[in-house]
Image (cartoon, rainbow, N blue to C red):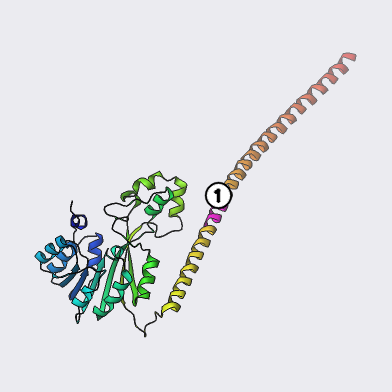
Amino acid sequence: MTHIDRYDYAFDPEGDAWAARVLRRIPPQGSVLELGPGPGAMTRVLLARGYAVTVVENDPEALSALQALGAQCIASDLDGSDWTAALADQQFDVILACDVLEHLRRPDEVLRALNTVLAPTGSLIISVPNIAYAGVVAGLRQGLFDYSDKGQLDRTHVHFFTRRSLERNLLDCGWAPRIWEANRVPLEQSEFAGCWKDLSDAQRSSLRDGWHDFDVYQWMVVATASSNSVAWEGAAARAQVDQLREELQALSLQQKRELASLLEHQKAFSEAKEIIEELQGEVARLHKQTMLFETEVQRLGKLLFDRTWLGHLRRLMGHR
């Protein structure tokens, strides 16, 4: 398998694959700048739909495949500056950066440079792996952080992102995140299935409970260029976002604790109810036995009384 073959794949553009969901975020028509498309799995679909596509790619094999597709190609390394010069005076309706930022040494510089080539009403669409995926955490619980040819721990990844860190990067670089979408992958279907299985039930439960995003394998965000007139005002806005997130997390943990307490009380109440029902049944049984005993005592008393008087009468008759 060649270097670019690792990043080539087929998907149904009308289906529910992650690539198809990303493409659905692109407006029906316009110009697209695609960063690091590899051999062009998504480029192929974009061109077939009539978009004008410009790509920035530095792999010679990938460039050959992209040129054959008919895309306008800029042979350049995104970690360099040549590509920005090649795009001078051009603006695009959409910039597509899917699974690219994690491969760059200076993703912040790329994000800042993209502000100059986006049309005023355009959008930036980014997809990145989520290093906070519970499968990665499961591996860390067992001391494992092994790189591989592709996936979360692709050996060519030099940056790792969570939703929060990506959001901060975008804000710092002049972008306003508008829409987030999660690619959720069951742990049992990921490359971390073995690590997940080796955890105890309690460990798996601790990773799932109270953590809504434990199974988010990738994050997608649609962002627009921010300006001095918008509400996202640097550090103040970030501090407010961080505060609200911390408050939400605190409320979530409090709710979790209260729910656990409620469930414990419900369990205790249910057990007490069962004990009360058993005791009530025992009381009823004893009450029934007591009534039977009293009835028997009365019968025996009457019988004894009758025999006593009968003996007395016999003695009287004997004296006569």
Around disc 1, counting alpha carbons within 10 Å, would you say few (fewer than 14), some (14 to 19), or many (20 or more)?
Answer: few
Q: Secondary structure at mark 1?
A: helix
Can you identify the residue that label 1 sits on?
A: 267
What is the x, y in percent for residue 182? 33, 63
Image coords of residue 80 (percent x, y) = 25, 70
Which residue extends farthest right?
319
Quarter-wise, where is residue 222 in the image? bottom left
Please indicate whether residue 255 sits to the left or right of residue 177 in the image: right
- Is residue 280 visible in the rendered image? The answer is yes
Between residue 299 and residue 81, name the one nearer to us: 81
Res 320 seen here: no
163 or 104: nearer the viewer: 104
Q: Which of the two residues, 270 or 248, is positioned nearer the viewer here?
A: 248
From what the image shows, is residue 231 above or below residue 307?
below
Residue 212: quarter of image: bottom left
- Quadrant containing the C terminus is top right
Q: Which residue is painted at 53% across and 53% down in the image? A: 263
Q: Residue at x 20, y 56 (%)?
A: 3
The percent position of residue 198, horizontal first and vertical second, equals 40, 44
Q: Amino acid at mark 1?
A: Lys
Q: Position of residue 66 (x, y in %)?
A: 13, 65
Mark count: 1
Q: Up-down: is 41 above or below 294?
A: below
Q: In the shown orientation, is residue 179 left or right of residue 58?
A: right
Q: Magenta stretch mostly in which secondary structure?
A: helix
The span picked out in magenta is 259-265
**Magenta run includes residue 260:** yes
